[in-house]
Amino acid sequence: MIDRALTDRLIDALMDLPTIEERATRTALLNGIRVAVNRTDNQVVDLTNILNQLDGLGRLDNGERPVVIVAQNAARIVRGTELGRRLTELARQIEEAYDQEPLLNDLPTEPEALIFGGPGEWVTSAFLEQARSVGTRVARLLVPRVVNGEVAHPVGGLGTGWLIGPRLLLTNHHVINAREPGEPAATAADFAAQARQTVAWFDYYVEGRDSANVAAVEAVHSNPALDYALLRLQDSPVLQGRAPIAIPQTPRTLTRGTRLNVVQCPNGGPLRFAIRNNFFVGRGARDFQIRYLTDTLQGSSGSPVMDDDWQAVALHHGAQKVSPESYRGEPGVQGIVKFHNQGIDILTIVRDLPAEIAGEIARAHGWT
């Protein structure tokens, strides 16, 4: 649940909305939230009841966060004003109040030094257009929790996935596994059932708004050691015009400081782009482990990690907190380092696939 002080600050901001005394204005705050809440004509009591009831829900059955939707709806009413900016900031803080990504145990406890900043902070319009195009091929994933063949909860896991081939969507094994850290893994039958009932939300830009949804039909292949799962999606009109994200046919040369971009759905929320101040820092204990610095949260698992040519070089799968003090005093460092992130080299995943599926991907990328 959200901190009481944060809820009170949101109520204070909502009370500053024009015509908030009118029930219709308060009702507009619930746009995109398809659950019933108890209402009253007293504006203070009504707002308090709305937020308390929605906060108690945590997430809706589709994985969205209703209190975030309320704050975003309010910010749109007064967009471009100081109150709008205040509400947008409150929405961001509420988003951050949700869970963070489980940490991997095999990542380094001490960060590597690297240089931040330098030339290349600007981008061209072509770069932004490519980013927009790539974003249409990245989806927010909603995975049910299935136990002994029965759906125990509609929101078992939230993650990110992306098109690597025709109707082929790549994500993490642990996203489809949909189990808490330390909990026994899903059985093979439950894992398969969760994969079949996973739904990919494309064009998901704002919570509470429509997205282009496609259901999966099967897990084509998976490997928990490489932490990937490849799903086949339904043959849906939604996929028309969505080409796979480009992947390199041969290994890309990555040197420390190479910029990487991560397109993701952090916290199970809308699509976000982490670009520019994100750097490759080295390989992990295994050569297929790629490490980099960028901002990710729970829900970012399964994102494509791309170079500045917008080719996916890795599948993001975890993070390790590092002390901001560890980078203090490093020459050229600009900003605070919070995490090392880790992805799995994409060509290692392709080589691990059955020959028939690897061939299907190769043909989609024009390699054969």
Image (cartoon, grey):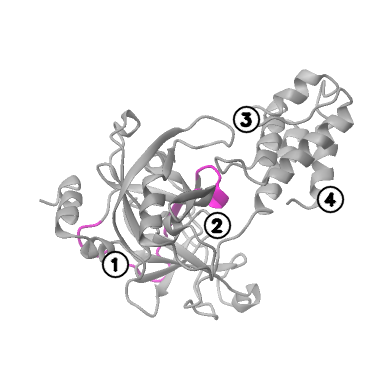
Task: Give, as a three-letter code, the residue at label 4.
Answer: Ala
Q: Is residue 24 left or right of residue 342?
A: right
Residue to which mark 2 is pinned: 298
Residue stretch rendered in magenta on the structure: 248-271
Q: Nearer the viewer, residue 199 or 277?
A: 199
Give the number of the disc on residue 5. 4
The answer to whether mark 2 and mark 1 are in CB contact below 8 A is no
Gap between marks 2 and 4 measured at Cα: 24 Å
Q: Residue at x 71, y 28 (%)?
A: 29
Q: Secondary structure at mark 3?
A: loop
Task: Give, as a three-letter code, the residue at label 1.
Answer: Thr
Q: Earlier in the sequence, mark 2 or mark 3?
A: 3
> Residue 224, percent across and down?
36, 67
Q: Nearer the viewer, mark 2 or mark 3?
A: 3
Q: Nearer the viewer, mark 3 or mark 4?
A: 3
Q: Residue at x 53, y 71 (%)?
A: 182
The answer to whether residue 254 is magenta is: yes
Task: Give, as a three-letter code, the residue at label 2.
Answer: Gln
Q: Nearer the viewer, residue 270 or 149?
A: 149
**Does residue 131 appear anywhere in the picture?**
no
Q: Quadrant of residue 126?
A: top left
Q: Secondary structure at mark 4?
A: helix
Gap between marks 1 and 3 measured at Cα: 48 Å
**Which residue ends up furthest to the left in the rendered image?**
368
Q: Nearer the viewer, mark 1 or mark 3?
A: 3
Residue to which mark 3 is pinned: 34
Q: Is residue 227 above or below residue 26?
A: below
